[in-house]
Amino acid sequence: MDKKFLNKVLEQIVSETRVDYDYMNGRIFLPYLNGFILFDLFPIAFPSYHTHFTEHCKNIYGLNKEEIDYVWDEYNHIIKDNIDG
């Protein structure tokens, strides 16, 4: 597993994720869903979110299951920290 490449993938997905604190109770744009969800629907560990994330990482970046799991875990930590401020 090339963590340097995976961290670049992670960096890209995080950069495509937008947090909007001004919308009601806050919302977040998830690039792998191509849409917004409300903060109160976080954590993003819902199975359908992980499925979309997996497909996005396979189709766009060519990642395997182990690589996707690594990026998913890191992504969740970063986004939760951004929301919790």
Image: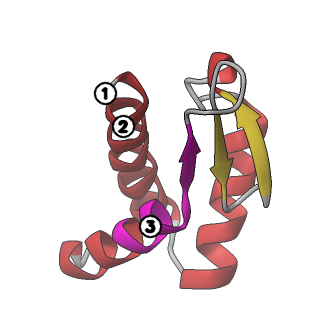
Give the amino acid type for the residue marked by disc 1 in the picture.
Gly
Q: Which residue is mark 3?
A: 15
What's drawn in magenta, residue-wise? 11-20
- Name which residue lies at 55% across and 24% down: 43
Q: Which residue is mark 2?
A: 82
Q: Nearer the viewer, residue 6 or 41?
A: 41
Label 3: state its secondary structure: helix
Q: Is residue 23 above or below residue 7?
A: above
- Mark-to-mark CA distance, 3 and 1: 17 Å
Give the amino acid type for the residue marked by disc 2 in the picture.
Asn
Q: Nearer the viewer, residue 20 or 6?
A: 20
Q: Please state which of the two labelled residues, at mark 3 or mark 1, is closer to the viewer.
A: 1
Q: Are marks 2 and 1 in contact (CB under 8 Å)?
A: yes
- Name which residue lies at 55% across and 57% down: 17
Give the amino acid type for the residue marked by disc 3 in the picture.
Ser
Report whether 62 appears left or right of 32: left
Q: Is residue 28 above or below residue 59?
A: above
- Counting residues from the N terminus, which is met first, the one under dot 3 or under dot 2? 3
Position of the C terminus by quadrant: top left
- Mark-to-mark CA distance, 2 and 1: 5 Å
Label 1: state its secondary structure: loop
Label 2: state its secondary structure: helix
- From the top left corner, tell me how far across and down residue 73 is, in percent: 38, 43
Q: Which residue is mark 1?
A: 85
